[in-house]
């Protein structure tokens, strides 16, 4: 008899694949087949996404989690099929995304989790390179090898390799330690005039990626408030003090904005700028703290060396909190 319906138990958990129990059951979905079709499609991406925790404090931890779908197949009469029933499907989930042209359910990079082939760091400053541990055997930085191990735990599926200060070349190799997958050039910037600021964002691969802004930074703020008129007349003396306000402010607060400049970068950094501007999670290292910021710039013309010669990007941000602490 033909397929009639399915029931899926969706388990979402951390640890090693398959290490779930009934306490990790998050959703049960049931769906009948549409007349005239031969398969049943279940969309779980948004359901799984609700359980991915993004919480960055300059600590670069893996945010990967496991999702296991246990699917039961039924015929039109509601009886279980006789073959391989149920079936289990295991997925490693990250806060990533594909572009429209990547088509449905794209398989993203399984090695270095950045798009650009260039990284810019201040002189004498270490950096971080996100890699997918399952697909990488070693990372070579200026002839120094870092072996990558994968024990299957979700908390180390995405690892952040330390880039030593003043490095120049990074080579990422497959699990056979001999097949070169990606070469990244590191440019160390000496900036004697301005203070470089590190902005970290969740990129399209679901990894934390750093981008330094080396040039001019400007800071501004917008104040919001409401007001009401108050009666200051003293009825006993039939007078009022001239030092008492007739219009009283309340609900006063402010939001701080900053405008940052990258300095001159290569054309392939366009992809990094694009991913930064569409990221939902962005932070800046500001006065010794990691603070959330929101990209305010909504329109950006991507620059090329042919059209623009030297490429510099200016992006406006707003801190993700009010100036006066009103957290309750």
Image (spheres, rainbow, N blue to C red):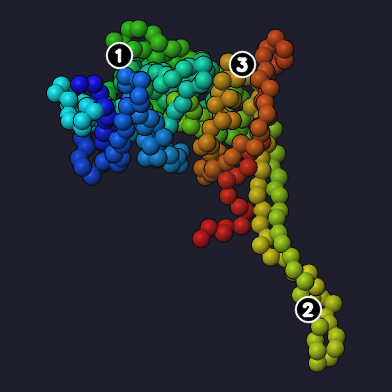
CA distance separating discs 1 and 3: 30 Å
Label 3 environment density (alpha carbons within 10 Å; few <14, some 14–19, many ≥20): some
The residue at 26%/30% (across/down) is 6
Among the 4 quarters of the image, the one containing residue 266: top right
What residue did someone put label 2 on? Answer: 231
- The foreground one among 203 and 164 is 203
Label 1 Cα neighbours within 10 Å, binned few <14 / some 14-19 / many ≥20? some
Is 120 placed left or right of 65 in the picture? right
Q: Nearer the viewer, residue 26 or 244?
A: 26
Q: Is residue 231 visible?
A: yes
Q: In what quadrant of the picture does the N terminus appear?
A: top left
Give residue 253's position: percent from left, percent from top.
66, 57
- Which of the two discs, 1 and 3, labels the residue nearer the N terminus? 1
First in sequence, mark 2 or 3: give its number. 2
Quarter of the image where one finds residue 318? top right
x, y percent for residue 241: 83, 80
Does residue 129 appear in the picture of this structure?
Answer: no
């Amino acid at each position: 008899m033909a397929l009639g319906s399915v029931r899926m138990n969706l388990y979402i958990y951390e640890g090693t694949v398959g290490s779930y129990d009934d306490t990790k059951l998050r959703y049960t979905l049931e769906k009948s087949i549409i007349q005239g079709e031969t398969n049943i499609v279940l969309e779980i991406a948004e359901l799984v996404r609700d359980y991915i925790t993004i919480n960055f404090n300059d600590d670069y931890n893996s945010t990967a989690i496991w999702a296991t779908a246990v699917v039961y197949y039924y015929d039109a009469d509601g009886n279980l099929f006789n073959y391989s029933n149920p079936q289990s499907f295991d997925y490693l989930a990250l806060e990533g995304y594909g572009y429209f042209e990547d088509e449905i359910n794209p398989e993203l990079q399984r090695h270095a989790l950045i798009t650009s082939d260039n990284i810019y760091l201040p002189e004498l400053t270490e950096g971080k390179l996100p890699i997918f541990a399952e697909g990488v055997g070693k990372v070579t930085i200026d002839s120094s090898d870092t072996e990558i191990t994968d024990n299957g735990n979700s908390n180390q599926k995405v690892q952040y390799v330390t880039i030593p200060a003043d490095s120049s070349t990074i080579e990422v190799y497959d699990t056979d330690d001999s097949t070169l997958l990606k070469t990244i050039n590191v440019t160390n910037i000496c900036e004697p005039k301005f203070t470089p600021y590190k902005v970290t964002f969740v990129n399209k691969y679901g990894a934390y990626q750093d981008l330094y802004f080396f040039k001019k930074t400007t800071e501004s703020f917008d104040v919001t408030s409401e007001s009401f008129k108050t009666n200051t007349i003293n009825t006993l003396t039939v007078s009022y003090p001239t030092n008492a306000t007739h219009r009283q402010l309340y609900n006063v607060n402010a939001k701080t904005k900053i405008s940052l400049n990258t300095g001159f970068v290569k054309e392939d950094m366009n992809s990094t700028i694009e991913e930064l501007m569409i990221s939902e999670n962005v932070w800046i290292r500001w006065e010794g703290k990691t603070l959330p910021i929101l990209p305010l710039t909504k329109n950006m013309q991507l620059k090329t060396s042919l059209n623009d010669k030297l490429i510099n990007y200016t992006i406006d941000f707003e801190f993700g909190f009010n100036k006066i602490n009103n957290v309750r």
